[in-house]
Image: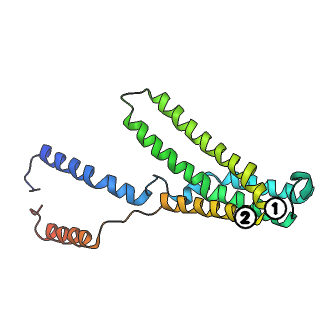
């Protein structure tokens, strides 16, 4: 942009630059979900503390009073600890990431549906996923893993898959390539040397 350009042209060029560069910069800094993984874990920290309290109750009250059909108390307690860790570190962050996707889709539908309907849809998806995981984990997988080795293998495979899902959802964005950065540095140097250079 030349120095003697009119204010309207300069503002329009600035607006265009912001529209081109700021969304990508935000994506790189915040990640694909819109919130970094560490922040997602902090959001769900109360659930992790609740899980620790539940584990303390299991240990304090006696194992058999909590789960009558458990074969080995130590195995059951380890499975419960792993279950709460997966819920905190993988399941809830994955649900948050999926909520982010649903909210983005609902923003596109804003002209076709009222905003309250998209909020209700997002809340329903989150609740359904959280309760679905609890049902799968506590009613089926945990009991099966405590009773048989095949169940234990399925339990571990399911939990490893959840870690894979959350790793995929929160994978970092590739920042601009090295050649793009070099081009930016070169053009900035030229702009400093030749003030009229755009």
Q: CA distance from mark 1 to mark 2?
A: 15 Å
Residue 63 falls in image quadrant: bottom right
Of the image marks 1 and 2, the number of the one nearer the N terminus: 1
Q: Residue 33: tell me if it is visible.
A: yes
| Nearer to me, 78 or 19 | 78
Question: Where 51 sits versus 105, above or below?
Answer: below
Residue on which the image places disc 2:
150
Q: Position of residue 187 (x, y in %)?
A: 17, 68
Residue 37: which disc? none
Residue on which the image places disc 1:
76
User: Residue at point 23% right, 71% down?
Assistant: 185
User: Residue at point 46% right, 62% down?
Assistant: 171
Quadrant including the C terminus: bottom left
Q: Position of residue 24 (x, y in %)?
A: 33, 56
Q: Position of residue 50 (x, y in %)?
A: 75, 52
| Nearer to me, 192 or 100 | 100
User: Residue at point 45% right, 29% down?
Assistant: 115
Q: Is residue 54 left or right of residue 13?
A: right
Q: Residue 170: tell me if it is visible.
A: no
Q: Residues within 10 Å of mark 2 (few under 14, many from 20)?
A: few
Q: Is residue 35 left or right of residue 15?
A: right
Question: Where 139 sits versus 105, above or below?
Answer: below
Query: Cβ–Cβ below 8 Å for labels 1 and 2?
Result: no
Q: Position of residue 134 (x, y in %)?
A: 69, 48
Q: Residues within 10 Å of mark 1 (few under 14, many from 20)?
A: many
Quadrant including the N terminus: bottom left
Q: Secondary structure at mark 2?
A: helix
Q: Is residue 83 left or right of residue 174?
A: right
Q: Secondary structure at mark 1?
A: helix
């Amino acid at each position: 942009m030349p120095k003697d350009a009119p204010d309207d042209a300069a503002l329009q060029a600035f607006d265009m630059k912001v529209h081109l560069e700021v969304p990508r910069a935000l994506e790189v800094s915040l990640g694909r979900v819109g919130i970094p993984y560490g922040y997602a874990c902090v959001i769900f920290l109360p659930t992790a503390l609740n899980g620790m309290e539940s584990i303390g109750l299991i240990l304090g009250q006696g194992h058999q009073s909590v789960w009558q059909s458990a074969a080995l108390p130590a195995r059951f307690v380890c499975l419960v600890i792993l279950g709460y860790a997966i819920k905190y570190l993988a399941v809830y962050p994955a649900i948050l990431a999926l909520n982010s996707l649903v909210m983005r889709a609902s923003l596109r539908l804003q002209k076709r549906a009222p905003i309250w309907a998209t909020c209700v849809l997002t809340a329903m998806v989150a609740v359904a996923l959280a309760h679905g995981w609890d049902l799968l984990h506590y009613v089926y997988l945990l009991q099966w893993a405590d009773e048989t080795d095949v169940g234990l293998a399925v339990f571990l495979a399911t939990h490893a898959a959840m870690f894979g899902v959350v790793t995929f959802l929160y994978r970092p964005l590739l920042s601009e390539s090295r050649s793009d950065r070099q081009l930016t540095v070169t053009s900035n140097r030229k702009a400093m040397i030749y003030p009229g250079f755009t």
